[in-house]
């Protein structure tokens, strides 16, 4: 019976893993990339009847070609989708599909599929246990195995219906937005090629979470080719931005030798220089990185993202004072983008010049006011408070940081420290109390979930 219960638990955990794929992922944030994804997705979001301000496109560090939704109006895109996509239209096709999951309420309805599958599994558990108790061990094990297969099959069939529904919705969003569906078809053809490469070419889609890619390609082509938008061209400026972001992302996530192979020094294009600049910087060659960035700036002296990279290279190479002018201009050109503003605040603090601390506090507060989900900005603000001797607010900023990073124990400790030093009833004290109260049950839950040694 213990074995049966463990088996049931394993199956239920497998369902939970399918519905919570973000837990172990690392979010990648970049001002230029986020601006591009917002512009690429806006017409699709509007076509889906959603408000662009309420929908987030979030990139996570994963080299596989994939995207998913996991609750709320958030589309998660793997970095591998960007680096391996041929063009912007391919990514737009994937976003359209994922928006189909959001408008279809598929994550909320996932519980229905889990409930049905769990019911089948529980029934097989009872019947299997009864058979074993009656001395029919082999029959009981057989019933359990059949129950597992039936339950998983039921759940996957439910998932496949959702995928097909999202495909249909994605097609309608693309057509309504006047965006070609060729990118979506190309995406599934990429997956299809992977299936062939790794031998996943079974004719039966029963044991697959998604319909087989060749089936999806056929259905999508039939639905999209007749639409007027099929032959629509991507805006050249948008495509150029995508190629830049793709190159810089490769420079950031791939090993430097791989980057140099894909973008040799004989390639003097903007994307190639962008990729090499990041690769040289990551490889601890600041002079080489600076050369590439300076070459980029000669083509566009006031490009905010080239200026941001110049400041980043200087800052992380131990030259914070030299980093201030390009970062200051980048902040102004992007109207105080919170990510770039946070880096500027960091540079001001890193100068170790107390005359810069007041400005650092001001810009960091500005960054947090626009985006309070940035742990790095909270960390830097905590440093400023600490330098001022305001240990209570330094603790509050630290509590905010750990709360965002999912560390309830440290968030709890710092919130308690903040409450002890901040006037009771003030806005900061109330915020510290909120973190304190949220963190306490999370700590208890983690202790309860911790396996016994």
Image: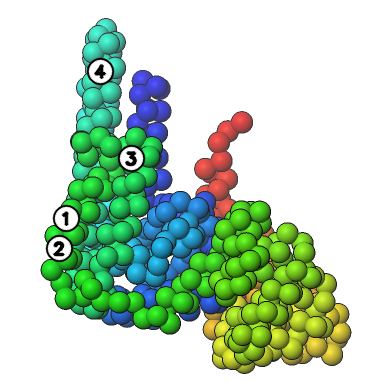
Residue farthest toward the right in the current orientation of the protein: 353
Q: Depth-wise, is mark 4 or mark 1 nearer the camera?
A: 1
Q: Between marks 1 and 2, how big is the CA–CA gap?
A: 6 Å
The residue located at (68%, 79%) in the rendering is 295
Secondary structure under tag 2 reads helix
Q: Between marks 1 and 3, how big is the CA–CA gap?
A: 19 Å
Q: Between marks 2 and 4, how big is the CA–CA gap?
A: 44 Å
Examine the image and state in which quarter residue 120 appears.
top left
In the picture, measured across the screen, residue 247 lies left or right of residue 411, that is left
Determine whether label 3 and label 4 are within 8 Å by CB. no
Secondary structure under tag 4 reads helix
The residue located at (86%, 84%) in the rendering is 353
What residue does disc 2 label? Answer: 223
What residue does disc 1 label? Answer: 219
Determine whether label 3 and label 2 are within 8 Å by CB. no
In the picture, measured across the screen, residue 256 lies left or right of residue 317, that is left
What residue does disc 4 label? Answer: 142
Lower sequence index among marks 3 and 2: 3
Instruction: Classify 10 Å Cα crowding around label 1: few (below 14), some (14-19), many (20 and above).
Output: some
Q: Between marks 3 and 2, how big is the CA–CA gap?
A: 24 Å
What residue does disc 3 label? Answer: 196
Lower sequence index among marks 3 and 4: 4
């Amino acid at each position: 019976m213990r074995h049966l219960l463990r088996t049931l638990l394993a199956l239920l955990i497998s369902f939970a893993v399918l519905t919570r794929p973000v837990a172990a992922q690392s979010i990648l944030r970049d001002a230029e990339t986020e601006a591009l994804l917002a512009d690429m997705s806006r017409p699709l979001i509007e076509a889906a009847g959603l408000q662009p301000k309420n929908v987030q496109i979030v990139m996570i560090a994963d080299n596989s070609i994939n995207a998913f939704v996991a609750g709320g109006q958030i589309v998660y895109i793997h970095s591998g989708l960007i680096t391996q996509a041929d063009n912007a239209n391919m990514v737009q096709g994937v976003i359209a599909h994922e928006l189909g999951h959001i408008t279809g309420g598929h994550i909320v309805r996932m519980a229905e599929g889990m409930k049905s599958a769990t019911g089948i599994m529980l029934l097989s558990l009872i019947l299997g246990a009864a058979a074993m108790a009656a001395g029919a061990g082999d029959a009981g094990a057989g019933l359990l195995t059949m129950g597992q297969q039936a339950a998983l099959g039921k759940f996957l069939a439910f998932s496949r219906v959702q995928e097909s529904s999202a495909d249909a919705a994605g097609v309608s969003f693309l057509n309504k937005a006047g965006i070609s569906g060729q990118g979506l078809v190309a995406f599934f053809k990429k997956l299809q090629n992977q299936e062939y490469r790794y031998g996943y070419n079974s004719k039966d889609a029963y044991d697959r979470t998604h319909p087989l890619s060749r089936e999806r390609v056929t259905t999508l082509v039939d639905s999209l080719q007749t639409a007027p938008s099929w032959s629509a061209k991507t805006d050249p400026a948008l495509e150029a931005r995508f190629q830049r972001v793709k190159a810089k992302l490769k420079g950031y996530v791939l090993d430097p030798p791989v980057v140099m192979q894909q973008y040799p020094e004989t390639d003097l294009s903007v994307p190639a220089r962008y990729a090499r600049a990041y690769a040289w910087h990551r490889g601890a060659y600041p002079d080489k990185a600076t050369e590439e960035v300076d070459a980029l700036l000669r083509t566009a002296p006031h490009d905010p993202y080239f200026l941001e990279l110049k400041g980043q290279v200087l800052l992380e190479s131990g030259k914070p004072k030299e980093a201030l002018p390009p970062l200051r201009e980048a902040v102004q050109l992007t109207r105080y983008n919170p990510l770039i503003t946070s880096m500027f605040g960091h540079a001001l603090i890193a100068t170790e010049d107390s005359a810069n601390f007041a400005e650092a506090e001001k810009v960091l507060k500005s960054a947090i006011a626009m985006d309070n989900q940035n742990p790095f900005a909270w960390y830097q603000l905590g440093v400023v408070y600490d330098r001022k001797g305001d240990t209570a607010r330094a603790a509050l900023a630290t509590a905010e940081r750990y709360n965002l990073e999912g560390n309830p124990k440290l968030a709890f400790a710092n919130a308690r420290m903040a409450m002890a030093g901040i006037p009771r009833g003030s806005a900061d004290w109330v915020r510290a109390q909120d973190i304190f109260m949220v963190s306490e049950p999370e700590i208890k839950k983690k202790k309860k979930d911790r396996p016994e040694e």
